[in-house]
Image (cartoon, helix red, strand yellow):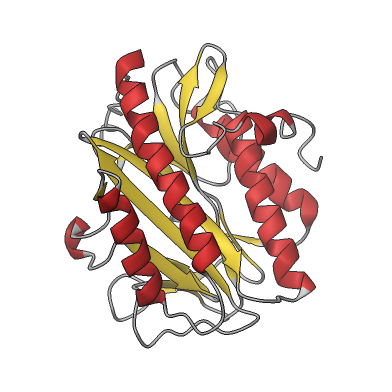
Amino acid sequence: MFRRRRLMIQVKTAEQIELMRAAGLLVGRTLEVLREAVKPGITTLDLDAVAEQHIRDHGGVPSFKGYHGFPATICASVNEEIVHGIPSAGKVLRDGDIISIDCGAIVEGWHGDAAITVPVGEIDAERARLLEVTEASLWKGLAAGVAGARLTDMSHAIESHIRSQGPYGIVEGYGGHGIGTEMHMDPLIPNHGSPGYGPELRPGMCFAVEPMVNLGTRHTRELDDGWTVVTTDGRASAHFEHTFAVTEDGPRVLTALDEGRERLAGATGPAGG
């Protein structure tokens, strides 16, 4: 007989959440620097160097570098690459590409983790819409992360929004996670599922929510490098992520520059709103 493993969800004090805010703000600001740096002709290794310098210059340590052997500061996933793309001098960004940049930093032992997908030059309407839908689904999930809710309420909010927008592929097998003194902690947060399941959300819990959405199939495969995950049909994918804390007053988005106030205010309506 198999026994389900008990989830160990770390609950933070107010002081610890402030330390996570410092790490999250560093991640958020690093991603804004990278957003401005993305342009045709730059390599993903160039972007990685920008990220590492910015994090270290501002008192942080890159979370990803050396994590289970990962060789870089950011994951840089271009077009059909979904997550965990390894930066390379040979990967030159072209006009019309999209690039997902996942970044983490540690400040005084506490982690922040976030991701954005950025257009390179001018992109077509289909890809632009993919970015809009994926980012909006992230904010729907974050808005559902209130004290007293269940874990899968966030999953359901993400899926409901994506399904309402078109026949997109929602990536399975990868998703959000707990975060705090480690980058990946209990629990796993799927980007799909029925509401009302899983642990009850309590103030002091912190999670990273990260929908990954494909233009075509939801199916994925891992490349021979042991890291990069791509769509099996070669169509483009988008990825957005934020770290947030559950509070008595609602979600506090630790990696958003304004703590998510503007986007959360617009994300509490119906799934397709």
Up-down: is 172 above or below 232? above
Residue 267: x and y, percent? Answer: 71, 34
Q: Quadrant of the C terminus?
A: top right
Is 273 situated left or right of 172 in this image? right
Q: State which quadrant residue 95 falls in.
A: bottom right
Q: How many marks?
A: 0
Q: Position of residue 82 (x, y in %)?
A: 49, 67
Indicate the quadrant where residue 15 lies: top left
Residue 170 against residue 88 in the figure, above or below: above
Q: Nearer the viewer, residue 176 or 153?
A: 176
> Which residue occupies the foreground of this view, 266 or 225?
266
**Residue 250 visible in rendering:** yes
Residue at screen point 52% across, 16% down: 147
Residue at image point 30% right, 21% down: 16
Residue at horizontal 66%, vertical 60%? 131
Judged left or right of residue 1, residue 167 is right
The image shows residue 265, relative to residue 113, as above or below, that is above
Q: Which quarter of the rendering shows the N terminus? A: top left
- Please name whichever residue, 115 or 52, is drawn nearer the observer in this view of the structure: 52
Q: Quadrant of residue 3?
A: top left
Q: Position of residue 122 (x, y in %)?
A: 71, 76
- Horizontal side of 171 relative to 1 (left or right) equals right
Residue drawn 58% across the image and 46% down it: 192
